[in-house]
Image (cartoon, rainbow, N blue to C red):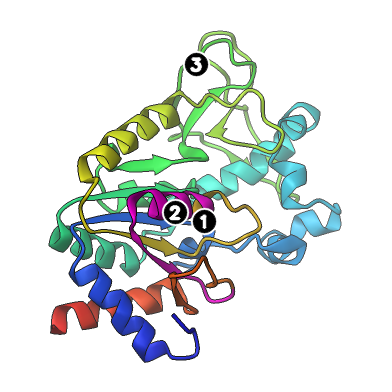
Amino acid sequence: MPQHDPENVLAASANALRNAEALLITAGAGFGVDGGLPDFRGANGFWNAYPAYKLLGMEFSDLANPDALVENPRLFWGFYHHRIELYKAKPPHHGYQILRRLVERIGSSFVFTSNVDGHFLAAGFSPDQVVECHGSLSFLQCSRRCDDSLWSSTGLGFTLSKDMLVEGSLPVCPRCDAVARPNVLLFGDDDWVDSRMSEQYERLDRWTTAVHGRRVVVLELGAGTAIPTVRLEGEVFSRQMAASLIRVNPREAFGPRGTISLAMSALAALTEIEKLVCDF
């Protein structure tokens, strides 16, 4: 669908959703940007959100890896504590409620997201219908992986210095006293406990089997090409299920042949699509 004809593309998106019998929502970091969450796109995007790390010459990948935890745990936890608190302070934006209304209309749905902010669950989506493929900052695990237990990240009680260093006691594993870490997939990560995600994938597989043969739509929101996990999941799913793929991305809306490409922010697109769906 040509991107230069936004009215027709919006109409095609609304029509696909109006006639859908099942909906797979796939969401990347761009979906969170609509709610004021930082965009880590490139070093400059990261430094805009965290200027203290620019002075240190550190990029996102320098902090989001297991070596950073070993080499400077207070710096590592300064970054992740700030993110945990930021995601708690920023409530899910209005786009989540639009999605919930679409889900109620369609009746059968699942969510696949690389976002670690927990906002789909905070917005009221069922935990049984969400895959968080990179984990969630809502949970901690042992950095040594003495076992595969997870526990809540609430109540850490940190304060941060002006240099983004944690002040106070670091969280530790309740079983072996090793420093704890967020249960999210880091770069070059061999110790991520993925049992929670594996259970989520099993539920997605069962849902996929249940909706096979129905009119299925994949609605992709804010998923870029830098880390293409979400884009590839939606493309493979749409091909295997003969599903319509609606790709919403202000910069990278292109897709395989037949993709309905909306070069808009996710919130703007959802707002316009809902109007068309409800006005029918």
Q: Which residue is mark 3?
A: 148
Q: Mark 1 to mark 3: distance in Å? A: 29 Å
Bounds of the magenta segment: 231-251
Query: Helix, strand or loop at disc 2?
Result: helix
Q: Which residue is mark 1?
A: 231
Q: Of circles 1 and 3, which is in front?
A: 1
Examine the structure image and report whether residue 237 is included in the region drawn in magenta. Answer: yes
Along the line of sight, which residue is nearer the eye, 5 or 121? 5
Which quarter shows the C terminus?
Answer: bottom left
**Residue shown at 36%/65% (left/top)?**
93
Q: In the picture provided, is 225 more to the left or to the right than 122?
A: right
Contact, mark 1 vs mark 3 (Cβ under 8 Å): no
Q: Of circles 2 and 3, which is in front?
A: 2
Expressed as whole percent of the image width and height from the top left, the position of residue 64 reads 68, 41
Contact, mark 1 vs mark 2 (Cβ under 8 Å): yes
Examine the structure image and report whether residue 218 is included in the region drawn in magenta. Answer: no
